[in-house]
Amino acid sequence: MSGVALDARPIGIFGGTFDPIHLGHLRTGFELLQSLQLSELRWIPVGNPGHREPPLAAAALRLEMVRAAVAGQPGFVLDEREVRRSGASYTVDTLEELHAEHPARPLCLVLGMDAFLGLTAWRRWTDILELAHLVVAHRPGWQRPEQGLLRDLLEQRGTTHAADLHAALAGRIYVHAVTQLEISSTGLRDIITSGRDPRFLVPEPVRAIIRETGCYAAQAD
């Protein structure tokens, strides 16, 4: 989509189970907010994911952890819509809602490289590119797909210019290197269930919630 009269900078969208949210998520979001000159970055915890196993922590608790993690950072906004939505959560539904709410604002969907490589398995994945740009956060040294639909998509829609994300509502793919902290939610849960402390891997308010609720320790057998 091009030639559209846009009225503001793009809105970034960072979704995920955030089970739990950690400093790797936050650093990636912060760098993209600044580098792409986004008006805001919306953190959208998934409620009931339609494409994977349910998260271990309850949706309300994950929402509380994300709220604590993003509090006080200008440009970070918590969006509760997927947790409040009944039934399974799909990215395309959220993008349709946001597009209807902000018809003249570009939307930038933030994806990790693993998520991007699985894009073609997503519900109505071709519609996603009609609703938003894709911003793919990756580690240095990433190799472009050499065959298949993703290679074709990058050839047709890829851009190396962040300004292109401001010039149209949707449809471009921007691959951006970010500082990668070697932290994963899966690894964090393993640390916690084994009785170790996640200090310095999650924000301190998130650590406090985890310790107070025992939300992951309770999963250990």
Image (cartoon, grey):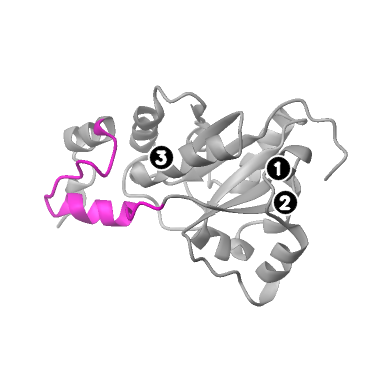
Q: Is residue 26 above or below residue 8?
A: below
The residue shown at (29%, 35%) is 203
| Marks 1,2: beta carbons within 8 A | yes
Among numbered discs 2 and 3, the one appearing first in the sequence: 3
**Residue at x-position 79% and y-position 30%:** 6
Query: In screen coordinates, is 49 left or right of 124?
Result: left
Label 1 sits on a secondary structure element that is: helix
The amino acid marked with disc number 1 is: Leu
The Cα atoms of the two marked residues, 1 and 2, are separated by 7 Å
| Image: magenta residue range | 180-204
State left or right for residue 39 relative to residue 7: left
Q: Residue furthest right?
A: 3
Residue behind mark 1 = 165
Q: Main secondary structure of the magenta part?
A: loop
* Pointer 2 residue: 172
Res 184 quadrant in image: bottom left
